[in-house]
Image (tube, rainbow, N blue to C red):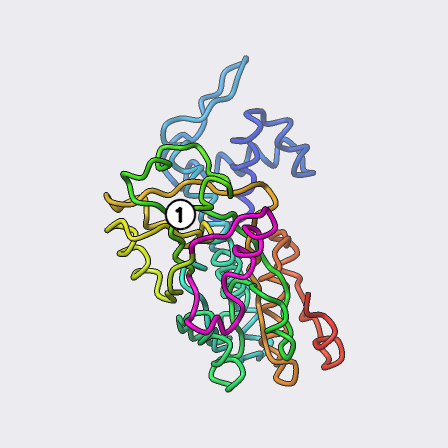
Amino acid sequence: MNSRQLEYFLAVARELNFTKAAESMFVSQTAVTQQIKVLEEQLGVHLFERTKRKVALTPAGRVFQEEAVDILKRIDLAAQRTRAVSSGFTGSLNVGFALGIGNTEVAERIQAFHQKYPNISMKFVNHSPSMLMKSLRSGEVDLILMPLFDEAFYGDIAYRKIAWDNLIAVLPKNHRLAQNQYITWRELKDEPLILAASPEKEVGEGKMILENFLRRGYQPQVLEPIEDVETIFFMISVNMGITILPAYLTASVYTRGRLAAVPFGGVTDQVDIIAGWMPDKASPSLERILPFLEGGLSDEEIGEQEPVLLSKKALSGDRK
């Protein structure tokens, strides 16, 4: 059994027609027929039911179709990893991430990067947004993945926006708005609001939320800022207030009997997620991961991706 036989088999399974399968593979029908016959002899089963009118997969053929797809994917991944080892490129990245980022598409992009560059060692640490900024500036981490708050606090770092998420209002389950399809700024203007922020709002946490209330002429009743999301959830569960969070932070709310999560605001009320790094500490590993984090790469492009060189000038000038 070889990969070419699997490709012929999958072509026939897709087209359910030997002639069309041969055309799609740019070979003769005889070649496809012979290779399928050899494959069936090797497996000891019939993969197709053939009549003058149609071709159909047998039950064994349907099972083998799933296996063949997985086998070809594993072969391709093995080739990618082998090429990575052969290239001799190794490196490391210490990545700091904010709570909940693993619930976004960013996690899939890091997985794709790890498959492409298995020799780049990655270590992860979870911190609050304010601690992530401190860790980046101190050199504890090379890269941070976190929400963007007030851009005035990010002047000394380079960053790129890599994703975004909608806002969600989290309320007690028995709250009068808990069964709504969505909630507006006006409906929360008189509610006790718990901001997810450090006491000093060190990276501008909550600014966007407060400014949206004020711009509409509402003066929210803001309680003492709380940085720990679990503490906020506990306070909401005992009816001490409500909060507004990015959707990626509210995944666990749906399993908690005393909390409700309701879509909030409008289509423009979103939180940006950034990848941030220090401009003077760019590394080859960082250069390779950024195209993946920004997304939009096809499987073919991922296989061909070359690092984007990040000069200090480019880094300091490309913060948005």
Q: Mark 1 falls on what kind of element?
A: loop
Which residue: 58% across, 68% down?
289
The magenta segment is 196-221
Q: Look at label 1 and name its amino acid.
A: Glu
Q: Nearer the viewer, residue 236 or 157?
A: 236
Q: Where is residue 89 shown, x and y percent of the image?
A: 58, 78
Which residue: 44% across, 44% down?
188
Above or below residue 1? Residue 78 is below
Residue marked by disc 1: 191
Q: Nearer the viewer, residue 225 or 20?
A: 225
- Is 160 on the left or on the right of 271, as rendered? right
Above or below residue 217? Residue 77 is below
Q: Is residue 288 magenta?
A: no
Which residue: 50% across, 61% down?
206
Residues packed near mark 1 inside 10 Å, few (<14), some (14 to 19) or many (20 plus): some
Locate the C terminus by quadrant. bottom right
Q: Where is residue 142 shown, x and y percent of the image?
A: 53, 79
Q: Is residue 210 magenta?
A: yes
- Is 46 on the left or on the right of 272, as rendered? left
